[in-house]
């Protein structure tokens, strides 16, 4: 009879606390929002500035204003960005706690 070696299950380290279902769901929603290259690029652009006017994002990405607004809504709904209005323009910035949670989830 042959024996098969069984490898130990690879999972979380002993010091890693398991995520609660709400934490897991929120983290998954944030990663899902980043599943689009344009949204990753928007987050990258916002990471080097305190805030960015939506008008600058439209020019930077050479996309229509409705398309940029759609991407920003997805990121806003995921809790990754927030906005404030000044006159007719909206200014977007990253939510530091949300970005920190993503870093932590990736082991940084």
Image: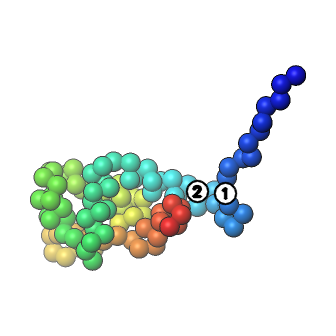
Q: Is residue 33 visible?
A: yes
Label of residue 12 in the image: 1
Which numbered marker is on residue 108? none
**Residue 15: image location, x then y, percent:** 69, 67
x then y, percent, for residue 106: 51, 60
Residue tagged 2:
24
Name the residue: 47% across, 65% down: 103
Q: Is residue 7 above or below residue 91?
A: above
> Disc 2 on helix, strand or loop?
helix
Q: Quadrant of the N terminus?
A: top right
**Residue at the limit of the structure toward the right, as seen here:** 1
Residue 5, image quadrant: top right
Q: Is residue 10 left or right of residue 53?
A: right
Mark 1 neighbour class, 10 Å CA radius: few under 14, some 14 to 19, many 20 or more: few
Q: How packed is label 2: few (under 14 Cα within 10 Å), some, or many (20 or more)?
A: few
Rendered residue at 27%/51% (across/down): 38
């Amino acid at each position: 009879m042959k024996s098969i070696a069984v490898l130990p299950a690879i999972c979380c380290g002993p010091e890693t606390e398991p995520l609660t279902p709400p934490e897991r769901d929120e983290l998954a929603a944030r990663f899902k929002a980043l599943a689009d290259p344009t949204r990753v690029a928007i987050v990258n652009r916002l990471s080097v500035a305190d805030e960015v006017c939506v008008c600058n994002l439209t020019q930077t990405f050479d996309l229509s204003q409705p398309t940029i607004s759609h991407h920003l809504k997805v990121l806003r709904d995921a809790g990754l960005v927030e906005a404030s209005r000044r006159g007719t323009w909206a200014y977007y910035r990253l939510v530091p706690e949300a970005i920190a949670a993503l870093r932590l989830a990736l082991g940084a």
